[in-house]
Image (cartoon, rainbow, N blue to C red):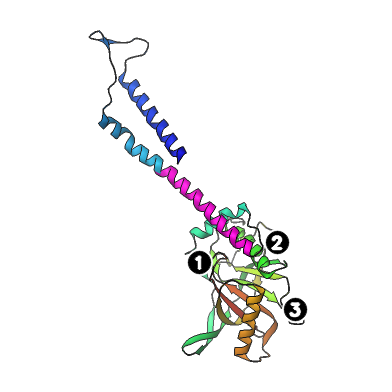
Amino acid sequence: MREVLRRSSEMLVKKLQDTVLQDSPNPKSHEKFSGEKKMALISIEDLAELDDEQLEDEVTENSQAVDDDEEEQRLLAHWQAVGRTHQVSVPREMTGPIMEMTRRNQQMEAVPFVTIATHEKLGEVVYEERVYPPGKWACITFGEKLYEQSISKGFMKLMRFICKENSAGRYLGMTVPVVNGIMMLKDGSGLENEVLTAYYLPAEFQANPPQPADPDITIVHRDSLRVITRVFFGTTTEETISRQIRLLWELLGTSEDIHQDQYMVAVYENPGVPSRRNEIWFIRQNP
């Protein structure tokens, strides 16, 4: 704000100087009128007319720049705070993608699917079965110590791909959900470290996908997928995911047609949302 006032003051002084020069005689040959030097007179009305509109424009432009900068700092600080809860560092280079996706957070395209069956209890949907058609996904794999570290690092890289770090050189558009593929340890005691994070390419790019600038990201064609899904809310950690897997197995009972060593976690909102919507997906062996 101090910079705004300084620039506005300089603008006003320059305007006054220009006005005086226009109304004053040639400085090299001072004219005289009635034996006195002619002086430029500026009224209060002239001042108001000269600087009000320009001053308002200057203040508005600079205030907007200050507001944008403050918003960038606020959002980055928020994501960094969320990152710390996942033991992940969010670098300053993520400011651009964070701002871009925040501005466009109402423009999300749903990954297409067809609902096969819905199972309810007391009028509420307990779980449902869907089929997702074949399509192209941008995928990246991380194998960090914690599940939340892997998905956070993977999603940040995908954000940069979505926000112009691609061969099209443009914002691609966000689709939901982002899907994390997980594998169980052989003894069933927990999750393997490696997590595959996948972003479905918008319909506009399915036929001719833009290529990622990051070599860690690959474009993969996935076949049709048939899943049983159940909604849950909140953060996703190995503990919360393991609990959701147990709950859905209790509802389903035993089934030989469902993979028991691999699952998917579908995320519908960004990591900065505290009670975000997620789904656990059980995968049918025969789509």
Which residue is labeled 1 in the image? 108
Image depth: mark 3 or mark 1 in front: 3
The residue tagged 2 is: 216
For the residues marked 3 and 2, what is the alpha-carbon distance in whole angstroms?
A: 24 Å
Q: Residue at x 65, y 59 (%)?
A: 212
What's the magenta region?
A: 60-87
Our reading of the magenta stretch's main secondary structure is helix
Mark 2: secondary structure: loop
Residue 203 or 63: which is nearer the viewer? Answer: 63
- Chain-order first, disc 3 or disc 2: 3
Q: Quadrant of residue 284?
A: bottom right
Tell me the kind of residue under disc 3: Leu
Name the kind of residue labelled 2 in the image: Asp
Q: Quadrant of the N terminus?
A: top left
Residue 287 in view in this figure: no
Disc on the earlier residue, 2 or 1: 1
Q: CA distance from mark 3 to mark 1?
A: 34 Å
Which residue: 32% across, 37% down?
52
Label 1's element? Answer: strand
Q: Is residue 64 magenta?
A: yes
**In the rendered view, would you say 164 is above or below 242?**
above
- Of all residues shown, which one is farthest toward the top? 35
Residue behind mark 3: 185
* Point 71% across, 66% down: residue: 142
Q: Residue at x 40, y 39 (%)?
A: 58
Q: Which mark is residue 33?
A: none
Q: Tell me residue 40's x, y (percent).
A: 29, 20
Secondary structure, mark 3, is loop
Question: Where's residue 82, x and y in %?
Answer: 59, 62
The residue type indicated by label 1 comes to: Met
